[in-house]
Amino acid sequence: MQPKYYGAAAQYNKPAGFSSGGGVGGKKIAMLAGLILFVIIIIVGGLSLVTSLSKGPQDDFVALAARTSNLQALLEKQKPTIKNADLKKLNAEATTLLITNSNDLSEQASKLFGVAEIPETVTEAQGMGDAEEALEKAKLSGTFDRVYITTVTDKVNGTFDLAKKMSDAVSSQDAKAVLEQTMANLVLINDQLSKIQL
């Protein structure tokens, strides 16, 4: 049976990690480096998340301003073709309301997100080309006023939905007030459209 050594010689047989020398220090440095790396990853990930969340509302808010402006321009353009007197009156009132809403939304986009001018690409993306096409066909078929009501109602509903989404997303009280007024005007326009008798 081999004798056991408990003296000084036994100390040299211990694994390097358990010595009082560089092994423990190396582990501490590795753990500290890992912890620092983990914290950096968390910070970078958090900043990326905040940036992506703030960009979503910005894009949608600017899109809403562009869509409202395009809807107003659509109504303005179709004014000469409307035959029904009540519909003519409603078109004029709705155009005025949408001009105010569009200006207010653009102002809020500038205040909240620093967007001084709505990009042309956004204006084009929020265009009313399909509505204009439907109304052009309606002119030829003699059903313009009826198609105008259904087409504008559809566009107003889509604009309302985006305004509602933005109202839930922004925290600025001024922006919320503008969005609430925009939604109220859109509801009023649709309500009046539904009452037109042709």
Image (cartoon, rainbow, N blue to C red):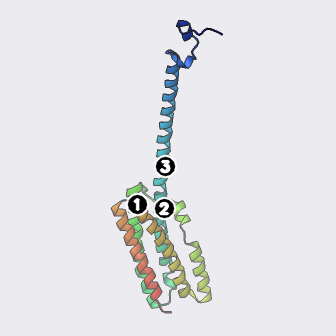
Q: Amino acid at mark 3?
A: Leu
Question: Which of pointers 3 and 1 lies earlier in the amino acid sequence?
Answer: 3
Instruction: Tell me the mark number nearer the camera, choosing from 2 and 3.
Output: 3
Question: Which of pointers 2 and 3 lies earlier in the amino acid sequence?
Answer: 3
58 vs 124, nearest the viewer: 58
51 vs 131, nearest the viewer: 51
Q: Residue at x 48, y 92 (%)?
A: 197
Q: Which residue is mark 2?
A: 60
Query: CA gap, disc 2 to disc 3?
Result: 17 Å
Q: Quadrant of residue 105?
A: bottom left
Element assignment for label 1: loop
Q: Label 3: how many residues lie within 10 Å, few (<14), some (14-19) or many (20+)?
A: few
Location of the N terminus by quadrant is top right
Residue 156 appears in view:
yes
Q: Which residue is mark 3?
A: 49
Q: Is residue 17 above or below residue 109?
A: above
Q: Which residue is mark 1?
A: 170
Would you say the residues marked 3 and 1 are in contact, meaning their CB atoms lie under 8 Å apart? no
